[in-house]
Image (cartoon, rainbow, N blue to C red):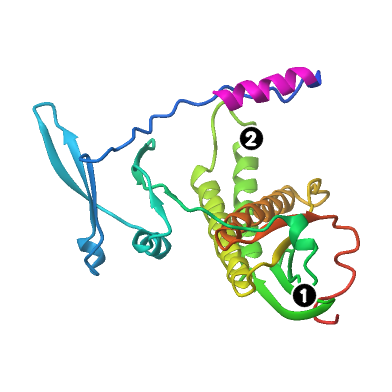
Amino acid sequence: MRSYLSNLAHWEKSGKKKGKPGLPGAKDHPTLYQGTCSLELESRDLHARFVQLKIYDGQGWRWVNYPAKCSRYFEQRLSSEAWEHKSPLLVLRPHAAEVHFPQTKEIAARKVRESKLDPELITVAVDLNVKNLAVITVRQHQRIIETVFVRDHGLDQQRYRHLRRIAKKQWQAGKPVKGEHSNQQLWGHVRRMNEDAAHKVARSIANVCARYPGCVLLFERLRKIKAKAGSKSRRMNRKQANQLRGKINQKAREKAFVEGVVTVEVNAHGTSQYCSRCV
């Protein structure tokens, strides 16, 4: 609510007629305190892992087991003493429910101004593209130490085929009905493809940063890239590709900061004049 009021005040102060921030949505995420939730991940058998919740069935309280799925990163943090565990949250979706286990860690990272004074500073520059989702270049003393290419493995072409199907169905359906969303399954699949690619590319960037402690992660400042010309499906594909760049930037910042690496955005002017293979 506080964020909504702040955004609304900024919008009213700007004097604009469009772009009024919407009302905050209702959230029903109850906190599961001690004695109401238990997580069992000791078994190596994935089918034997479960989360135990204390449920009220109308007559009394009883413990109910639900199958649990978690990533290997969550398991590593669960056994690490550096990560502090908070009370889990029960997140209710329209057709599903999830239990989120917040974890916090105190990060010791140098400020950018202090890093600039270091004569041995190592920079990890990331150039986000379409086919090569990320070109990661590590430099020190104006010399390239390492270059890593992260390919899209056909993501752009697959996404374009899905968006072409969506554009064709929208053309066949005619004028859209206000308040209804078409092709929800295809749009959901496209969003999941982008989300998965963003996590994988961000993890590759964070792994490179982890090999050079004290380095600075550099991204281009890309804000006003608009899809122009081409068919409707191509314009939608370019928009999705631009959104993917933003997701990679955001998730790489988070994963790199866990390694104690700060991120800086630089002016994109002149950053792509030379091929990283030829420099």
Tell how many labels: 2
- Magenta stretch bounds: 1-13
Lateral position of residue 148 relative to residue 97, left or right: right
Residue at point 35% right, 59% down?
78
Image spot of residue 156 (x, y percent)? 66, 62
Q: Which mark is residue 174?
A: 2
Residue 242 lies in the magenta-colored region: no
Q: Nearer the viewer, residue 241 or 163?
A: 241
Element at label 2? loop
Image spot of residue 270 (x, y percent)? 91, 63
**Residue located beneath label 1 in the image:** 139
Image spot of residue 50 (x, y percent)? 23, 54
Residue at point 18% right, 36% down?
55
- Amino acid of disc 1: Arg
Q: Is residue 206 above or below residue 69?
A: below
- Amino acid of disc 2: Gly
Element at label 1? strand
Q: Which image quadrant: the C terminus?
A: bottom right
Q: CA distance from mark 1 to mark 2?
A: 53 Å
> Is residue 12 at least partly visible in the picture?
yes
Q: Quadrant of residue 198?
A: bottom right
Residue at point 63% right, 68% down?
152
> Which of the two discs, 1 and 2, sits closer to the camera?
1
